[in-house]
Image (cartoon, rainbow, N blue to C red):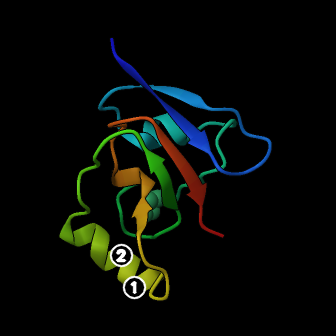
Amino acid sequence: MKTVTISFACDGYEPLDAELGTWLNLVLDHPGSPVAFGCRSGLCGTCAVEVLESSGPLESPDEGERETLDVVWPDRQGLRLACVMRAQSDMTLKPVD
Ligand code: FES
């Protein structure tokens, strides 16, 4: 089983390991994660994160993810929704305030 490491760009949270391809909401809905979740289906925008680093390419956001980000975070560029992303590579995430 190949794993990747999800790190956080905020104090007090240790990196979490995830099986490659796992949905991030399954990994990050954890007391040791700073990422908050609401709908878990890409609709509410609660789980918005900045991907500060990635060891490999990430899937591009689909139309639904882009629409949610445009509505909920219209002034922020480059955000992603953790609930509709997979653990594809080592990543450093920063939750959006
Ligand atoms: S938890 Fe609602 S969009 Fe991710």
Q: On the image, which quarter does residue 56 sit in?
A: top left
Residue at x 39%, y 39% (from the top left corner): 55
Q: Is residue 68 above or below residue 28?
A: below
Q: Which quadrant of the picture is home to ligand 1?
A: bottom left
C-alpha gap between disc 1 and disc 2: 5 Å
Tell me where residue 91 appears, x and y as whole percent: 47, 42
Picture residue at 29% right of the left edge, 49% below the top: 58
Figure quadrant of the N terminus:
top left
Q: Quadrant of the C terminus?
A: bottom right
Q: Residue at label 2?
A: 68
- The percent position of residue 59, horizontal first and vertical second, equals 24, 51
Is residue 4 positioned above or below 9 on the image? above
Residue 9, image x and y in percent?
66, 50
Residue at point 35% right, 57% down?
41
Q: Position of residue 79 (x, y in %)?
A: 44, 68
Horizontal side of residue 50 vs 19, given as left or right: right
Mark 1 lies on a secondary structure that is helix
Q: Is mark 2 within 8 Å of ligand 1?
A: yes
Q: Is residue 35 left or right of residue 17?
A: right
The extreme right residue here reads 12
CB under 8 Å between discs 1 and 2: yes
**Numbered badge on residue 71:** 1
Residue 47 visible:
no
Question: Callout 2: few (<14), some (14-19), or many (20+) C-alpha neighbours within 10 Å?
Answer: some
Q: Amino acid at mark 1?
A: Val
Q: Could you say which is closer to the camera, residue 4 or residue 56?
A: 56
Residue 73 visible:
yes
